[in-house]
Image: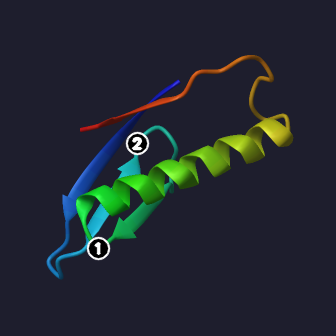
Amino acid sequence: MQFTIETEQENDGRWIAEIMEIPGVMKYGNDRHEAIALVEALALRVMAERIEAREQAIEPISISFAAA
């Protein structure tokens, strides 16, 4: 699985990062790097929950992130 992270700086200076392939997975950070780290961790938690609930195939997976 390859996830694309889009980032944008808000008017108040915070950064928002969003995983495009998983709707609703977005996090704010004080800087771009923090926002990316937080959204990657959230995406991994969401994927783990999907695997545990058997919503995701239970087979060896490879996950990578690419900041856009």
What kind of residue is marked 1?
A: Asn
Disc 2 from disc 1: Cα separation:
20 Å
- Where residue 47 sits, quadrant-wise, is top right
Q: Do residues under tags 2 and 1 come within 8 Å of each other at their CB atoms?
A: no
Badge 2 or badge 1: first in the primary sequence? 2
Give the secondary structure at mark 1: loop
- The local secondary structure at tag 2 comes to loop
- Give x and y (percent) for residue 30: 29, 73
Camera-side residue: 41 or 49? 41
Residue at (14% x, 77% y) in the render: 11
Q: Dot 2: few (<14), some (14–19), or many (≥20) neighbours within 10 Å?
A: few
Q: Label 1, on which residue?
A: 30
Q: Is residue 10 above or below residue 8?
A: below
- Quarter holding the C terminus? top left
Left or right: 9 with respect to 22? left
Q: Which mark is residue 20?
A: 2
Above/below status of 17 relative to 55: below
Render colour scheme: rainbow
Name the residue rendered at 72%, 17% in the picture. Answer: 60
Residue 38, position as x, y percentages in the image: 46, 59
- Residue pictured at 54% horizontal, 28% vertical: 63
Q: Is 57 located above or below residue 40 in the figure? A: above
- Tell me the mark number nearer the camera, choosing from 2 and 1: 1
Q: Amino acid at mark 2?
A: Met
> Badge 1: how crowded within 10 Å, few (<14), some, or many (20+)?
few
The x, y position of residue 61, in whole percent, is: 65, 21
Outermost residue, top side: 60
